[in-house]
Image (cartoon, rainbow, N blue to C red):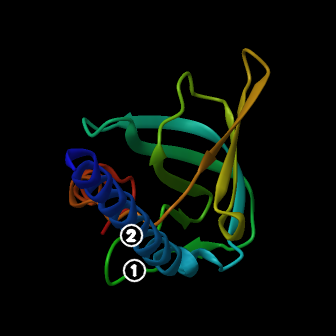
């Protein structure tokens, strides 16, 4: 009898986890559809600022290629993970370990990813981009951006 209670609680827990996961995935996908805007760019790292919220931060870039001259759109709930103005760009994301001045970064918003090339070690890595919704991260961007508000 006590095993039946345990089994029922276990099944209920599994059902709740699956429900919450599916609901969260749908919300995440809806939130990030705004990045299907064909923004892409490449550049070299000129500065890296890391927040105290895990490894989130700002990677400032000197652009070598860009599909748009300027990108500064705003969202109702959150901010885009990138901003471009003239020959400069910022990427708001998890700072990859070992990224330094002069390393190369490329981004394709529709694919929701970024690629990093470490000049000194000649290694490549990939990161993911998403709409920034954490209030602490948004505040960090507002206080540390190279662009005027």
Check the image and name the residue furthest to the bottom.
76
Q: Position of residue 123 (x, y in %)?
A: 76, 23
- In this rendering, would 14 be left or right of 66? left
- Which one is in front, 74 or 15? 15
Q: Quadrant of residue 66?
A: bottom right
Q: Quadrant of residue 46?
A: top right
Callout 2 touching callout 1 (CB < 8 Å):
yes
Q: Which residue is mark 1?
A: 74
Q: What crowding class fits label 1: few (fewer than 14 Cα within 10 Å), some (14-19), or many (20 or more)? A: few
Q: What crowding class fits label 2: few (fewer than 14 Cα within 10 Å), some (14-19), or many (20 or more)? A: many
Residue drawn at x 74%, y 71% is: 67
Q: Which residue is mark 2?
A: 79
Q: Is residue 119 above or below residue 25?
A: above
Q: Could you tell me if residue 72 is visible in this image?
A: no
Q: Does dot 2 land on a helix, a strand or a loop?
A: loop
> What number is the disc on residue 28?
none
Residue drawn at x 74%, y 15% is: 121
Q: Is residue 105 above or below residue 33?
A: above
Separation of disc 2 and disc 1 at Cα?
6 Å
Check the image and name the residue furthest to the top.
121
- Which one is in front, 77 or 105? 77
Q: Is residue 32 above or below residue 7?
A: below
Q: Could you tell me if residue 147 is visible in this image?
A: yes
Residue drawn at x 66%, y 55% is: 113
Callout count: 2
Q: Position of residue 85 (x, y in %)?
A: 54, 66
- In this rendering, would 39 be left or right of 17? right
Q: Position of residue 3 (x, y in %)?
A: 27, 45
Q: If the image is split into quadrants, where does the C terminus sit? A: bottom left
Residue drawn at x 43%, y 45% is: 58
């Amino acid at each position: 009898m006590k095993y039946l209670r345990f089994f029922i609680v276990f099944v209920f827990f599994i059902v709740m986890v699956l429900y919450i996961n599916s609901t969260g995935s749908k919300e995440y996908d809806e939130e990030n559809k705004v990045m299907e805007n064909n923004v892409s760019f490449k550049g070299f790292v000129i500065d890296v600022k890391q927040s105290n919220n895990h490894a989130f931060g700002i990677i400032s870039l000197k652009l070598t290629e860009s599909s748009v001259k300027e990108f500064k759109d705003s969202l109702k709930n959150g901010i885009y993970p990138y901003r471009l103005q003239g020959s400069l760009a910022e990427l708001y994301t998890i700072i990859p370990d070992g990224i330094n001045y002069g390393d190369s970064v490329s981004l394709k918003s529709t694919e929701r990813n970024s690629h990093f090339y470490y000049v000194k070690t000649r290694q490549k890595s990939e990161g993911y981009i998403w709409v920034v919704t954490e209030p602490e991260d948004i505040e960090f961007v507002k206080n540390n951006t190279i662009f005027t508000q």
